[in-house]
Amino acid sequence: MGMAINQLPRIREECEVFHLSEKQCREIMSRLHNDLVKGLGKDSHANSIVKCWITYIQDLPNGKERGKFLALDLGGTNFRVLIINLGENHFDMQSKIYAIPNHIMTGTGIALFDHIAECLANFMKEHFVYEERLALGFTFSFPLKQLGLTKGILQRWTKGFSCSGVVGEDVVQGLKDAIARRGDVQIDICAILNDTTGTLMSCAWKNHNCKIGLIVGTGSNACYVEKTENCELFDGEPGKPELLINTEWGAFGDDGTLDFVRTEFDRDVDVNSINPGKQIQEKMISGMYMGELVRLALVKYTRMGLLFGGRGSDLLYERGNFYTKYVSEIESDKPGDYTSCMEVLEELGLSHATEADMAGVRHVCECVSRRAAHLVSAGIATLLNKMAEPRVTVGIDGSVYRFHPHFHTLMCEKIAQLVRPGIQFDLMLSEDGSGRGAALVAAVACREREVQA
Ligand code: GLC
């Protein structure tokens, strides 16, 4: 065998495009801050890219909620139905995951809601509550213009969904109609909420400092507690000093704001997605796209002769074949060990990879995931600075944050660098994200109804 030239330095050089300097992060923060302010403003809201929807969730749980509640969780890779029993200082929860087949994700809204209602009814049978009348919280993780706690108009689909006849419609009504079409179960839909909100609520049940909810999963988004006086947009009763805002920051960059840091790989992912031009920030961060970004970079470096002796594989050259979970697996290998990396490359038909190739592949993964962590951190630091509270806990969920071995640490370091001196923060993994959150919101809503009655 001839002496192979070590290409790692050239791969490192190429990967510089993924690096965000501190200065760039600060520029991103100031742009995001402007967009948030625009989203919250009465006159600027309509043209704002970052929408800052008001959630109409009025109270955080106080730990005194009791009873049996149902919850639905739609919007990631899985659809879940849950039943939760809230007791004193403990809760018990059972849930089941149902598939949303591809033809339903991209079919009609009616078929989607009928499918959800059917899963719900089956679940109720299996858990012996088919005959009961129960309250339900619905986590629906897409941009909703909320008109109340139980009314939300879908603004756009994200993350690969595209059911017809739902954009511009009230999603709660859609589900109610489907339940009525069946006519067999009795459900009170008490609340519809975003997964970020569910995550925040779920964490706030135990930790009263929790004022930001973050998802880094299939998609990327955050919600936070804002002073009512900063929300011109809000035209409800002023009563409460604070409101919970769903930023929908995944759309940040849709007007070109992030072009100064985007790469050819980001443009490729976007152009080939089902929603080109939309959710630009999300496409640089989240699990639905991260693996594909890595794959595109690997393909380019292979064609340049920097990887695999210039010999790729059919699988590598085909879209969607590099899963985001591979990034977490590859980066979980100890330094100098490439066990997972080798498995992944074998799966992709690249068993001719040398150790130098594996080091290169790992480096690409690290650069793409680190950039994602830094972008999320810039977002969180923007919120922390805007809130200007001495100490805030961020409740976090999502597959990327949960399974990537370094995401948490990368975020802690970066946020600490970007946040204003004197502001402290904690990053807390939500134990059961948005599902339990939805049940809690339903519980709080019921608590309030009883008080009013
Ligand atoms: C997408 C959705 C948003 C959700 C996020 C995380 O960005 O638009 O509502 O919170 O994904 O699931």
Image (cartoon, rainbow, N blue to C red):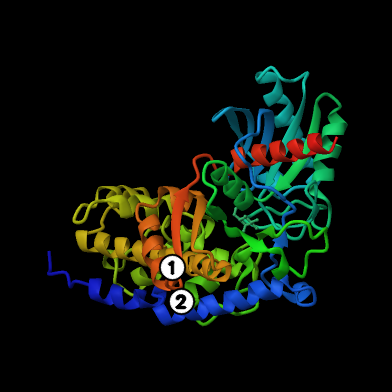
Q: Is residue 303 in view from this perspective?
A: yes
Q: Position of residue 85 (x, y in %)?
A: 62, 26
Determine whether, in the image, residue 326 is placed left or right of residue 446. left
Quarter of the image with the C terminus in it: top right
Instruction: Say which amino acid is labelled 1.
Output: His
Residue drawn at (59%, 41%) of the image: 78
Q: Which residue is mark 1?
A: 374
Report the image quarter containing ligand 1: bottom right
Q: Determine whether the residue tagged by mark 2 lies in a helix, strand or loop.
A: helix
Q: Are marks 2 and 1 in contact (CB under 8 Å)?
A: yes
Q: Is residue 115 in view from this perspective?
A: no
Determine whether, in the image, residue 64 is placed left or right of residue 442. left
Instruction: Say which amino acid is labelled 2.
Output: Cys
| Distance from mark 1 CB to nearest ligand 1 atom below 8 Å | no
Instruction: Give me the disc on residue 25.
Output: 2
Q: Position of residue 32 (x, y in %)?
A: 58, 74
Which quadrant would residue 298 be assigned to in this image? bottom left
Residue drawn at (58%, 59%) of the image: 222
Q: Position of residue 215 (x, y in %)?
A: 54, 54
**Quick one: 400 or 66, which is closer to the camera?**
66
Residue drawn at (29%, 67%) of the image: 307
**Quick one: 387 or 28, which is closer to the camera?**
387
Residue drawn at (27%, 51%) of the image: 333
Q: Position of residue 101 (x, y in %)?
A: 65, 41
Q: Which is nearer the N-term, disc 2 or disc 1?
A: 2
